[in-house]
Image: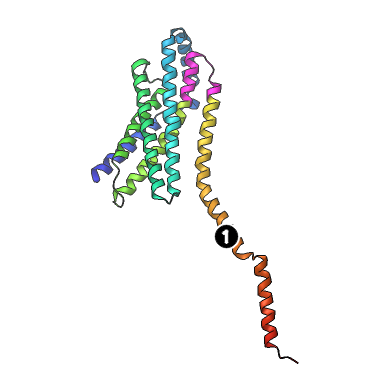
Amino acid sequence: MKPFLKMLSSAISAGFFTLLLLPFPFIQGHAERDRNHTYNKNKLHQVSPKLLFEIKLHGVLLWASLGFLMPLGILVIRMSRREEHGRRVKIMFYTHVVLEILAVLLATAGAAMSLKHFDNSFSNTHQRLGLALYIIVWLQTLIGILRPHRGSKARRVWFFAHWLLGTALSLLGVINIYTGLQAYNKRTSRSTNIWTIIFSTQISLVVFFYLFQEKWYYIKNKAGAILGSNEAVQPTTDQETFPVVADNEKKADVLPQP
């Protein structure tokens, strides 16, 4: 157990240290933006139709992987916590596993494309963040495979590490898709406004359902309790009439006749 915890803590520390070194676009200096703009301007004529197709395919693979399948898998496994039936929990668990495996395969295909066909100078945020994401994706996969049995001491540490890496992976994946759209715009001078709006709408819906399912269980139980109490408190017409008649008859039997 100690080697596993040591390896896990080292991997988490290395991942976060790598992320801390990544500069975001909004804190880059004007000089770097000017250099990138001049460089991209000179490279526009070198974007062949084949390279343009590969860039688009790379973006679609990573969008489907980190921007859709992975958040959807997190949403499914989160919803399974509210289920009481064992069969539904198993179905949701295996759905989560299938979605995450597909996400890893698509992310690996996108990474292979970027390493084979693109200029990997790692001179911008998108490339550096993408490299860190590829490492975290397979680290998360390894942690998922090494899942301890329920009731063991390492289970709680494993659950926290798996949840932390999964959440960080989804958030950073979403950020890197936005930076990828910016990089595509700079490289090809084509507008990405419509794709940014579509992706933002999709992520907003995922976040909405994530937050809604957290409250839905509480709302459903609260509404059931209120309806149940109303049915128990409000008597029917028969319940209001016949007991009164019975009480009057009892009183008439007890009172002495003149």
**Which residue lies at the image location 38% right of the left edge and 27% below the top edge?**
106
Q: In which quarter of the image is the C terminus?
A: bottom right
> In screen coordinates, is 118 left or right of 42?
left
**Which residue lies at the image location 38% right of the left edge and 23% below the top edge?**
110
Q: Position of residue 105 (x, y in %)?
A: 35, 28
Span colored in magenta: 178-195
Which of the colour schemes (rainbow, by chain, secondary structure, one colour) is used? rainbow
Decide: is 164 above or below 172. below
Q: Mark 1 points at which residue?
A: 228
As for residue 190 lying within the magenta part, the answer is: yes
Q: How many marks?
A: 1
Q: Which of 244 and 9 is in front in this view?
A: 244
Q: Position of residue 81 (x, y in %)?
A: 43, 48
Decide: is 162 above or below 184. below
**Which residue lies at the image location 46% right of the left edge and 13% below the top edge?**
40
Q: Which of 124 and 254 is in front in this view?
A: 254
